[in-house]
């Protein structure tokens, strides 16, 4: 059980997000503090009953946290947390799944549009003050999305929104999910994840929105890339390790696929010597798909909901993991 509201202490731990600053004006009567680096977090872990965290998490923090009873992840992913160790210590864990579904879906669609309309090339030309002339070669022109096939790998909250946005552009949408009998949403057809390889040759655009699990790690490998159309684009707003990055670099270098829009990479930040940086048919954003001006408020809304559930001793948390 959590301590009473007037005795609890929440630690907001993030290098950039202004969670504490957004929480304080709410006049909740709950004590809280913010840390922005690993060293300070280690020194102050003993004060926290509740930890709101994502990238700063280290398993060694558990030995410094005698009061810790609940971890609210700032992001949807929770693969960094040791679930068994948390369960053994009676520490609950919840994700922020859905907190940025709208933002990530919009970002995915922005990457699709940017590649279709060759916006990175236009920006490069603007920087060089080049007014590109008309193009006779059809393959070198901007393209239209209407009538093309979009394959959404992971038809959850984010993937479902991507499907709805794509339908607004008159695209044919195929979705993949573990349970194809669940809500089809805007997708024209839904299949199991095991059917990925048979569907890849149909897709003009593949958008990855699935979680990182043992089953999805390196899901897009050399064999999968070889089944894509040479004219197809890959967009990854899931996790970097869903794609075999070495195989992707090789496929892009050989122009076996048309291009990629990447918000995530296998290692972050992306190494300065990665070949991906210099590829004109690759558009990279630094894992910012979920960042919006409303992000902190969305996380806090989930946090407050879960705190109330814990105080009511409810067995199920919102987005419960442990």
Image: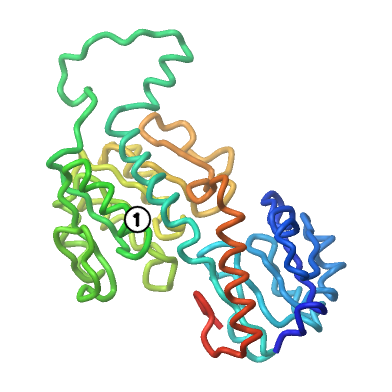
Give how far across and how far down residue 222 sits, in percent: 31, 55
The residue carrying pointer 1 sits among few (fewer than 14), some (14 to 19) or many (20 or more) residues within 10 Å by Cα, namely many
What colouring does the structure picture have? rainbow
Quarter holding the N terminus is bottom right
Identify which residue is drawn at 14% across, 52% down: 202
Q: Nearer the viewer, residue 158 or 261?
A: 158
Residue 178 left/right relative to 138: right
Give how far across and how far down residue 59 sits, in percent: 70, 74
Outermost residue on the front side: it is 27
Quarter holding the C terminus is bottom right
* Camera sees residue 43: yes
Q: Nearer the viewer, residue 118 or 190?
A: 190
Residue 234 left/right relative to 232: right
Give how far across and how far down residue 201 sits, in percent: 15, 52
**SS at badge 1:** strand
In the rendered view, tell whether residue 124 sits above or below residue 201: above
Give how far across and how far down residue 297 sits, in percent: 60, 56
Q: Nearer the viewer, residue 117 or 306?
A: 306
Res. 134 image quadrant = top left
Q: Nearer the viewer, residue 125 or 12?
A: 12
Identify which residue is drawn at 48% across, 56% down: 100
Residue 245 left/right relative to 173: right
Total labels drawn: 1
Outermost residue on the right side: it is 43
Identify which residue is drawn at 59% across, 76% down: 306
Res. 53 image quadrant = bottom right
Identify which residue is drawn at 84% across, 61% down: 40
* Camera sees residue 85: no
Which residue is under mark 1?
A: 208
In the rendered view, tell whether residue 205 sits above or below residue 307: above
């Amino acid at each position: 059980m959590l301590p009473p509201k007037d005795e609890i202490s929440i630690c907001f731990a993030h290098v950039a997000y202004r969670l504490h600053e957004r929480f304080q004006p709410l006049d909740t009567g709950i004590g809280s503090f913010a840390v922005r680096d690993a060293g300070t977090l280690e020194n102050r872990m003993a004060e926290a009953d509740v930890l709101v965290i994502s990238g700063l998490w280290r398993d060694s923090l558990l030995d410094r946290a005698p009061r810790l009873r609940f971890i609210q992840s700032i992001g949807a992913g929770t693969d960094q947390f040791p679930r068994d160790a948390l369960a053994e210590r009676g520490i609950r864990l919840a994700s922020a799944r859905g907190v940025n579904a709208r933002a990530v879906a919009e970002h995915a669609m922005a990457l699709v549009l940017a590649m279709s309309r060759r916006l990175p090339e236009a920006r490069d030309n603007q920087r060089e003050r080049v007014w590109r002339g008309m193009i006779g070669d059809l393959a070198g022109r901007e393209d239209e999305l209407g009538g093309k096939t979009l394959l959404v790998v992971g038809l959850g909250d984010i993937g479902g929104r991507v499907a709805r946005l794509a339908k607004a552009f008159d695209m044919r949408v195929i979705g993949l999910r573990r349970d194809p009998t669940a809500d089809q949403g805007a997708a024209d057809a839904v299949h199991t994840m095991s059917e990925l390889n048979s569907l890849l040759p149909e897709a003009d655009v593949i958008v990855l929105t699935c979680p990182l699990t043992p089953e999805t790690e390196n899901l897009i490998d050399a064999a999968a890339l070889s089944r894509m159309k040479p004219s197809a684009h890959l967009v990854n707003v899931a996790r970097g390790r869903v794609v075999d990055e070495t195989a992707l670099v090789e496929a892009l270098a050989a122009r076996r696929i048309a291009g990629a829009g990447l918000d995530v990479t296998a290692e972050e930040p992306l190494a300065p010597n990665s070949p991906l940086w210099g590829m004109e048919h690759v558009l990279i954003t630094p894992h910012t798909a979920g960042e919006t001006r409303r992000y902190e408020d969305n996380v806090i809304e989930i946090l407050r909901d879960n705190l109330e559930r814990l105080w009511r001793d409810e067995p199920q948390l919102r987005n419960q993991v442990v």
